Amino acid sequence: MRRAIELAGNAEAEGEVPVGAVVVLDGRVIGEGWNRSIGQHDATAHAEIMALRQAGKVVQNYRLLDAVMYVTLEPCPMCAGAMVHCRIGKVVYGAPDLKTGAAGSTMNLLSYDQVNHHVLCESGVLEPECRAQLQAFFKRRRAEKKAEKQARRALEANDKEA
């Protein structure tokens, strides 16, 4: 999970929501990813999807039986669905996502009765660190937007005076 937190820092450095993911199989990292949706103009470029893509290439198979995904934020429905389809063994996440979490917070697609594969799930691993990273990002983002709005108002006021 600590590596996933580091990768989330890569996302933040690129102006993305700081989420990082790592896929481990037999004690070896086979996939890593961080959010890249904005930079790649791709709604599917979530940290988990990026890590699953890399892991599939490493093992030369889209099925990742017995692999474990470590991710800093609870997976969304898209990512949870991808984990079911690739038959990953377990997901370990840090912070819950109370708006779109699909591993138990708002819904649980990982163990939905009607699907043929259920993914084990462990939550709350390094949760304070994962949550703090996300909260600091969004606090800074809100402050930046507020400053931009104030600057725009000041310019508009100057234009009216001129």
Image (tube, helix red, strand yellow):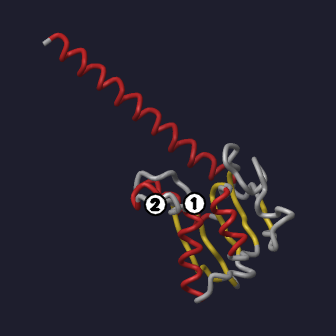
Residue at the front extreme of this rendering: 114
Quadrant occupied by the C terminus: top left
Circle number at residue 51: none
Find residue 79 and report its horizontal and vertical position in percent: 64, 63
The crowd level at tag 2 (other Cα within 10 Å; few <14, some 14-19, many 20+) is few
Local secondary structure at mark 2: loop
* Residue drawn at point x = 72 percent, y = 75 percent: 88
* Residue drawn at point x = 50 percent, y = 57 percent: 43
Circle number at residue 42: 2
Circle number at residue 5: 1
So how many labels did they put on this image? 2
Find residue 107 and report its horizontal and vertical position in percent: 77, 51
Q: Amino acid at mark 2?
A: Asp
Residue at the left extreme of this rendering: 162
Question: Which picture quadrant has residue 58?
Answer: bottom right
Quadrant occupied by the N terminus: bottom right
Find residue 37 and report its horizontal and vertical position in percent: 47, 58
| 102 left or right of 137 in image | right
Depth order, front residue of 29/113: 113
98 versus 125 height, above or below: above
128 versus 65 height, above or below: above
Q: Earlier in the sequence, mark 2 or mark 1?
A: 1
Q: CB of mark 2 within 8 Å of CB of mark 1?
A: no
Q: Amino acid at mark 1?
A: Ile
